[in-house]
Image: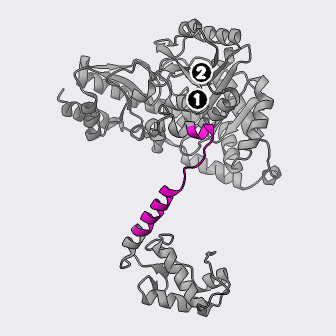
Amino acid sequence: MDFALTLLPDSRQPVYKQVSEALKSAILAGRLRPGEKLPSTRDLADSINVSRFTVIRSYEELSAQGYIQTTSGSGTFVNKEIPGHLEDVKGRELQRELVAQAVPAAALSVYGERVMNCEEIEDANVELFAELNYGAPTVDQLPLTRWKEMLYRATRYQDDNMLNYHSDPFGYMPLREAIADYLIRSRSVNCTPERVVIFSGAQAALDLVGRLLIDEGEAVALENPGFPGGRRSMLTHGAEIIPVPVDGQGMIVEHLEALNQRIKLAYVTPSHHDPTGVVLSLPRRIALLDWAARTNAFVIEDDYDSEYRYGDKPMPSLQGLDENDCTIYISTFWKVLYPVVRIGYLVVPRRMVRLMGRAKSLIERDFPLLEQKALTDFINEGHLERHIKRTRAFYAKRRAALVQALTKQFGKRIFISPVTAGMHVLVRFAEDLDEERVLAAAGQSQVSLVSTVNHYITQRRQGEFLMGFAHMPEEAIFQTVQNFAERLKI
């Protein structure tokens, strides 16, 4: 066990005293925490290149002072209670804070200043709603046994290339081939493996697209309401945000057409609009692509939540309709496999392949190869699609139970979105039900409920919420909703 201590060769202090003082300082500064195990005397002696007898004397001195204790057969530990320790730690922390406040603020770049000072860029916890479990699947539905099998197989290195250094910035080619085949089959995406780019997550992919395409002051069209993460990402690049309203057929492209300014990029969630869940209609898809081709703009298609549609036939991707090479397709395995797999990916237009390759090699060149290999096998052997099919039926039952319970308990005092997709439903309560009161009752009843306020750029709707159902046991849904209604005195 390596352990770093600073010993001064020209010090007049005995070495054992230097060791004990260094350990005491680490304890008082909080670098060694109460209850933390220390290295054995032999290991510490080897690590700092002193005799074991020296370390033994140091430990004996610290033990006598009440800083550490040795338990036979278990080892040496920092005492859980040290007289004056908490006060010392607080005093040192206060001193550090005072010093930090006296230091001039860091000289930030334009990007750094924008991230820190733009009022429209909320903290991440605003978007990542803990109440909805970040939009992730319920853990008991994850294919953990199958995934462990895939990982174990990957560790056996059957392919000698697995031991080589991989420097393709686009990611593991067999995985890109598997994703391309899956997208062509399930989403009618027009792509080849050479255009698939693997990222650690979809947000990282979106950030790089913004860096490559957006200069400060250029206009980006976003759905209103829309995904808060997309808006924040574009704002960090200095984009001017142009809100485009959404109705029952998705983004209203006529508003986009009527704009009197150059739009560099349009960001849409056409398969399952966030947060309303509506699907961008076929006429509007064609109109959006036609607009992009005429204005030399790009369209980012975030294929958010396209896997979970209950009863409705999924519409082919926007990218699959694109004949002018202007669509950037982005997706992730988050909704299906989080937290087992967090990988995201892009399908880039042909004209962006070289650009993306050069940029990607500068920021994210390598990935954990075992995870990529395991995911490759998971997709190729059909486990991914079987998992989606099974969980789609599972979540459909929970959604139906929630809608039935809400309808029975609230009647005409609630609007429930008819869109049958995703892992939450959009609801709007009667105007006389105050938002704070609704949220308080939901928390007391353990109902997953989050306001859509942060999805809106302008003209937010009062009393509108996302209600999660993925983590509500089907047999408990009715009672949970009944408790919620009773607390609201419906």
Residue 99 drawn in magenta: yes
Q: Is residue 187 left or right of residue 93?
A: right
Residue drawn at point x = 44 percent, y = 40 percent = 133
Give residue 484's quadrant in the image.
Answer: top left
State if disc 1 and disc 2 touch (CB < 8 Å): yes
Tell me the kind of residue under disc 1: Met
The residue beneath circle 2 is 220
- Residue 361 at what x, y percent from top left? 76, 41
The residue at the point 59 percent across, 43 percent down is 341
**Height in image: 310 above or below 473?**
above
Instruction: Say what amino acid the circle numbered 2 marks.
Output: Val
> What's drawn in magenta, residue-wise?
91-113
Q: Main secondary structure of the magenta part?
A: helix
Disc 1, SS: helix
CA gap between label 2 and label 1 equals: 8 Å
Q: Residue furthest left?
A: 489
- Quarter of the image containing the N terminus? bottom right
Q: Position of residue 97 (x, y in %)?
A: 46, 60
Q: Position of residue 186 (x, y in %)?
A: 64, 25
From the viewer's side, name the closer residue of 275 and 68: 68
Task: Please tell me whether mark 2 sits on a helix, a strand or a loop.
Answer: strand
